[in-house]
Amino acid sequence: MAKVKKAYFCQSCGFESPKWLGKCPSCGEWNTFVEELVTKSSAAPTTFGLETSKPLRIDEIDLEKTPRITLNSGELNRILGGGVVPGSLILIGGEPGIGKSTLSLQIALRTHGLKTLYVSGEESAQQIKLRAERLGGNNSDCLIYCETLVENIITQAKHTAPDLVVIDSIQTLLTERIDSSPGSVSQIRETAAMLLRYAKESATPIFIIGHITKDGTIAGPKVLEHIVDVVLQFEGDSNHIYRLLRSAKNRFGSTAEMGIFEMTSHGLREVDNPSEMLVTQHDSQLSGIAITAALDGNRPFMIEVQSLVSSAAYGTPQRSTTGFDIRRLNMLLAVLEKRVGFKLGAKDVFLNIAGGIKLSDPCIDLAVISAVLSSNLDIPISTDICFAAEVGLSGEIRPITRLDQRIAEAQRLGFKKIYVSKYGQKGLNIPDGIEVKFVSKVEELFRSLFGKG
């Protein structure tokens, strides 16, 4: 007979406690413990009727028998490391309305020759059909199944033997083993473990959609992110049409990859050339705009940095950034005031990264300083000039990694000049058609750009 007991679980990390605690001893969060019923069953673990594996020597494992599954999405294949590994568990997280369900349904509809079981716990079959007609895909091998009980889902997957399973979403699933509501820590942990066991025993890859909390982390216990093989994070803004798909964890590839999609009325469209998307074409030259050659993963692209410097209207100067770390901006403004002599302490400074994306690449420093100087002097920077270097506290221009790729991307897009660090020219291959300007200090950059000093 099953024993029923009560326990308290931390909604942030999944830590279990026999009594209520104000502060979680595992993650340090306050007021996160919720009481749940836990059912301890004496039944044997579910095997799904699959063959039990046995230990193998590592040289006996043949990788050619399990090739990666190629999806009808070049961006997604590249982020996953060349395709989907059989038996992998892939978690897709993001804000509501960002495009998680759209992306997963497009995978099921547009990858022909791949039998897919699309399981939805949030929509009816008719609603999914309406969305499929809007997306324009038609795949007779796509099976729609509306269910929330994980035992029934695994039974149907066993009978239909799909090549790929999509779960929308993990927060709606429940199992009869646990006497608690869907979305609770215990339900998410147990259902994810059952799906993981099925995926490994049947070599069937499973895409799982996960909701996120208000602070941007995936809802549920942290163990969910530990047991899955890949964690993909959808980023973007409802006010912008572009979506960024980043790999936060990948056991079978690099986590330094990023994919860019455009949200249209017919679903998500892959953006093959992000540089042309992120650099705005202006009819005339404008002050406060500088272009940087950024790098995210293995992909170089050009990004427009916009700055506005004006006198403080209310006494206290404002510092505001969009897509850039405000602490980094304050540091760069201090460097300009100390090394170049600009008195920006009494002025408002606003900074924006065009396209609604967020960057942490240090190469953007030189473009930020150039945009701020351009706006302060009201002198535009030529549209065929770009920047790629880091700025130190002493005002020195520091080198960055993989400069060859950045210069090649700038030359391909028609830029005539690029400013880089003087200390990074060793072994540098400069293509024809672009001039590389080496600078060592911020003062040298100021004199070269604006002919002053």
Image (spheres, rainbow, N blue to C red):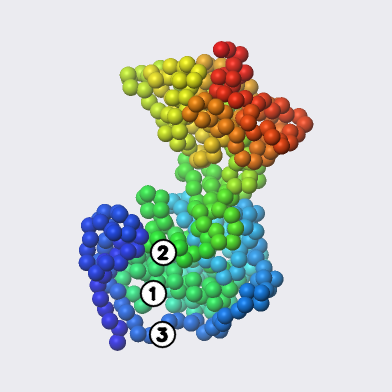
Q: Which residue is mark 1?
A: 175
> Residue sitting at 38 percent across and 74 percent down?
175
Identify whether 294 is placed above or below 91: above
Q: CA distance from mark 1 to mark 3?
A: 15 Å
Name the element at disc 1.
loop
Whole-percent x, y for residue 449 in the image: 61, 19
Q: Which residue is mark 2?
A: 223
Say which of 12 and 155 sits in front: 12
Please report whichever mark, 3 or 2, sits nearer to the chain's N-terminal start: 3
Whole-percent x, y for residue 14 in the image: 34, 63
Can residue 85 be seen at all in this image of the molecule?
yes
Few, some or many residues within 10 Å of mark 2 (<14, 14–19, 20+):
some
Few, some or many residues within 10 Å of mark 3 (<14, 14–19, 20+):
few
> Residue sitting at 52 percent across and 66 percent down?
89
Residues at badges 2 and 1 in contact (C-beta under 8 Å)?
A: no
Name the element at disc 3.
loop
Q: Amino acid at mark 1?
A: Thr
Name the element at disc 2.
helix
